[in-house]
Image (tube, rainbow, N blue to C red):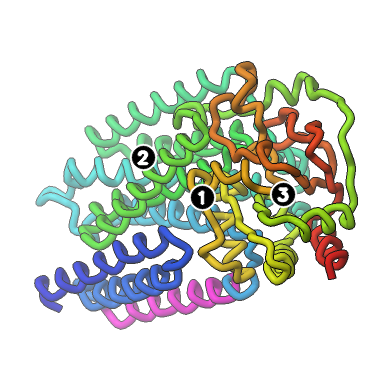
């Protein structure tokens, strides 16, 4: 294939990827966005295969085998994965992108002539060493960090897999805890390792040293692990978005090594969009990106055992059903409790029956609800909740004052009014949904345990709040049954 034709093909693929990002910015256009992304990726793969220099039949055979294996695994995972497990699946995908970048960098370092990155003397070009070094560092950090993020999101491995770790099982369980794991002197350790990685990168660029390359890679794996374990579940949406950005920059770095413009453009798109989303989500939490990376959010209050013990008003599904079916306006606030209980379809039944009774029903989505960006939107879309009744926080927050009922499903920290009033609270200043302004609040929760921030929620003790203890799916089904 000619260079000009390949360039045109890559340009078309890049346009498809841009349209994909635009489409994925809204639930209403997400299907079209996915299709654009699939078309763009298919074009990019075909162009790359046709443009391979000096390719032999065996080369295409190995590529085809890899496509069949990878595509087969992807198909099976896509068919079997529960929507509630999407956050950890995304983290797993990020880890594979990082690992691919590491493997490509190792391959390029081992056989630089095959990659066309050597000078007449057989040495790797100086610029190629920089690109390769940055690619493998970012890729290694992305891989190990994503593995830990997957563990924190999954929370528990299947017993058969856990047994494979043998005596390391307690360590694995600890690493997979959603609580922040604060190592003594962690900041000093991370800064030391980071400085060593920079020095090794400079050594590798200057001397093309195998020792520097190896140590740099191992330390990058280590710091990826150390950066994520201090981060608690409250910050997981930002972490997932951040790792998405890392995976893009890793791909872009390796794109320079491979001299593949499509990989550079795609990596830059993913990296920049992930970085922008991370920034937006940090703003939604009123936290700086640096504070998220440093980790440990909410650990102080939980560890000190400072949670208050006060009386709450417990209600029943019948109470909630009677009040909601006689209301004029109900706002449903989904949180991670809905995802854990897989209650989205029961919530759809609640929406349907309330709508038939003439009640206006809307959904309020906080930017960091759940475990990943858009987690609640995905679950509601799976249950075929109409897009036009789902609103982001800034669109609906001023409507809680006119709502007869706010029906909260396990959304703890994002509804905590302490964020607006308590200057000593770890979440003070974080924008929250103004659930406390509704005339009545029904809060579904398994227990009085704190959320990921590890702090008490004054909303539980308000006179107008009624706690509905139990599994979100079962409680919502009971409410629907009581209305029937």
- The structure residue drawn at horizontal position 61% and vertical position 57%, both measured from the top left corner, is 362
> Of 447 and 272, which appears nearest the observer?
447
- Residue 308 painted magenta: no
Q: Residues within 10 Å of mark 3 (few under 14, many from 20)?
A: many
Secondary structure beneath disc 1?
A: strand
The C terminus sits in image quarter: bottom right
Residue 264 drawn at (x, y percent): 26, 55
Is residue 411 placed above or below 460 in the rendered structure? below
Nearer the camera: disc 1 or disc 3: 3
- Circle 2: is it few (<14), some (14-19), or many (20+) Cα within 10 Å? many
Q: Is residue 11 visible?
A: yes
| Residue 434 placement: quadrant | top right
Mark 3 or 2 closer to N-term? 2
Q: Is residue 38 left or right of residue 82?
A: left
Mark 3 residue element: strand
Residue linked to disc 3: 405
Residue hosting label 2: 213
Mark 1 and mark 3: span between their CA atoms? 18 Å
Q: Position of residue 381 (x, y in %)?
A: 57, 66
Residue 216 lies, in percent from the top left, at 40, 36
Q: Is residue 258 above or below residue 345?
A: above
* Vertical arrangement, residue 116 with respect to residue 225, above or below: below
Which segment is the magenta one? 56-77
The disc, 2 or 1, on the residue closer to the chain's N-terminal end is: 2
Asked if residue 296 can be seen in this view, the reply is no
- Give how far apart the Cα atoms at labels 2 and 1 are: 46 Å
- How many neighbours does mark 1 have within 10 angstroms: few (below 14), some (14-19), or many (20 or more)? some
Position of 119 compared to 469: left or right? Answer: left
| Residue linked to disc 1 | 392
Work out which quarter of the rendered image holds the N terminus and state it. bottom left
Q: Earlier in the sequence, mark 1 or mark 3?
A: 1
């Amino acid at each position: 294939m000619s260079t000009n034709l390949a360039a045109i093909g890559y340009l078309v693929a890049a346009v498809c990827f841009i349209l994909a990002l635009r489409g994925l910015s809204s639930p209403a256009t997400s299907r079209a966005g996915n299709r654009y992304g699939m078309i763009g990726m298919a074009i990019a793969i075909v162009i790359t295969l046709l443009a391979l220099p000096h390719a032999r039949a065996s080369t295409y055979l190995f590529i085809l085998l890899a496509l069949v294996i990878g595509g087969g695994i992807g198909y099976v995972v896509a068919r079997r994965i529960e929507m509630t497990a999407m956050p950890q699946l995304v983290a797993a995908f990020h880890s594979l992108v990082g690992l691919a970048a590491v493997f490509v960098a190792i391959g390029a370092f081992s056989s630089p002539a095959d990659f066309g990155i050597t000078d007449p003397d057989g040495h790797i070009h100086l610029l190629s060493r920089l690109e390769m070094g940055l690619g493998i560092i970012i890729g290694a950090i992305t891989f190990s960090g994503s593995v830990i993020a997957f563990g924190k999101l999954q929370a528990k491995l299947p017993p058969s897999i856990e047994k494979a770790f043998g005596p390391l099982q307690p360590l694995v369980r600890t690493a997979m805890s959603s609580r922040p794991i604060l190592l003594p002197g962690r900041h000093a350790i991370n800064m030391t390792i980071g400085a060593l990685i920079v020095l090794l990168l400079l050594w590798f660029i200057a001397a093309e040293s195998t020792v520097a390359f190896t140590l740099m890679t191992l330390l990058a794996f280590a710091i990826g692990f150390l950066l994520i374990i201090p981060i608690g579940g409250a910050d997981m949406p930002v972490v997932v978005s951040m790792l998405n950005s890392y995976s893009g920059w890793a791909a872009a770095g390796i794109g320079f090594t491979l001299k593949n413009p499509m990989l550079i453009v795609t990596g830059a798109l993913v990296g920049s969009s992930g970085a922008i989303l991370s920034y937006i989500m940090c703003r939604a939490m009123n936290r700086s990106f640096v504070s998220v990376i440093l980790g440990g959010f909410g650990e102080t209050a939980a560890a000190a055992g400072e949670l208050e013990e006060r009386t709450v008003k417990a209600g029943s599904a019948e109470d909630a059903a009677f009040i909601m079916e006689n209301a004029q306006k109900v706002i449903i606030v989904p949180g991670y409790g809905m995802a854990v209980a897989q209650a989205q379809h029961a919530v759809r039944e609640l929406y349907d029956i309330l709508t038939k009774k003439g009640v206006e029903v809307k959904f309020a989505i906080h930017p960091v609800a759940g475990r990943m960006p858009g987690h609640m939107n995905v679950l509601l879309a799976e249950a075929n909740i109409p897009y036009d009744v789902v609103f982001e926080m800034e669109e609906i927050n001023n409507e809680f004052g006119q709502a007869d009922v706010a029906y909260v499903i396990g959304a703890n920290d994002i509804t905590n009014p302490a964020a607006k009033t308590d200057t000593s609270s770890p979440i003070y200043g974080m924008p929250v949904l103004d659930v406390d302004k509704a005339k009545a609040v029904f809060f579904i929760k398994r227990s009085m345990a704190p959320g990921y921030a590890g702090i008490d929620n004054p909303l539980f003790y308000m006179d107008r709040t009624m706690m509905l203890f139990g599994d979100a799916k079962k409680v919502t089904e009971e409410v629907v049954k009581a209305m029937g």
